[in-house]
Image (tube, rainbow, N blue to C red):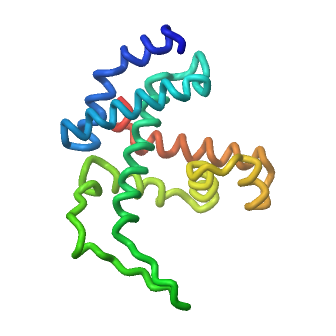
Amino acid sequence: MNTVFRDLVQEEYFKLRNFALKLTQDREDANDLVQETVYKAMKYEEKFEKGTNLKGWLYTIMKNIFINHYRRVVNSKIFSDDTDKQYYINSAKSTSANDAENDLGVEEIMEAINGLSDNLRIPFMMSYNGFKYEEIAEKLSIPLGTVKIRIHMARQKLKAQLVHFVE
């Protein structure tokens, strides 16, 4: 492990903690979120490109962890029926309340994403869900360069709309 990288990440600790508190509205959850963020940053250190914005990279990791956790909580409340019509049953009455949507901005982030035009939102979400650029280009039948431009434009628009999430 690169000690210089570790020191740079540690320099961002308090900023990460403040952002985590804004997201979770709970001290213990914020501490868990920061811990998981730092762990993933250290684990994927080789993916960080020198000269890029470390703070932005760490915030993106944290935001993704937070959103993935939210999705897991929401999806744990939905059961699938294997009949022909595949009804979805919301089991909210039998589970504890989930206030994560009300916590800082998940709803706002999703609204911003959903507000993108389809030609930007679809490649962006495919990339977010783990598809490689080449796979996106193939599935959407568009050139690779177009995929890259659309994802970049989606990120820029979201960054401009959600500027208060990135200090």
Q: Residue at x 33, y 31 (%)?
A: 34
Q: Residue furthest bottom?
A: 84
Q: Quadrant of residue 111?
A: bottom left
User: In the image, 99: left or right of 12?
Assistant: left
User: In the image, 46: left or right of 67?
Assistant: right
Q: Position of residue 88 (x, y in %)?
A: 42, 80
Q: Residue furthest top?
A: 4
Comparing 19 with 161, the one in front is: 19
Q: Is residue 63 above or below residue 122?
A: above
User: In the image, 110: left or right of 53?
Assistant: left
Comparing 52 with 129, the one in front is: 129
Q: Residue at x 62, y 46 (%)?
A: 151
Q: Position of residue 56 (x, y in %)?
A: 46, 29
Q: Position of residue 28 (x, y in %)?
A: 21, 37
Q: Is residue 77 above or below residue 68?
A: below
Q: Quadrant of the C terminus?
A: top left
Q: Position of residue 82 (x, y in %)?
A: 51, 84
Q: Is residue 159 above or below residue 39?
A: below
Q: Residue at x 49, y 29 (%)?
A: 57
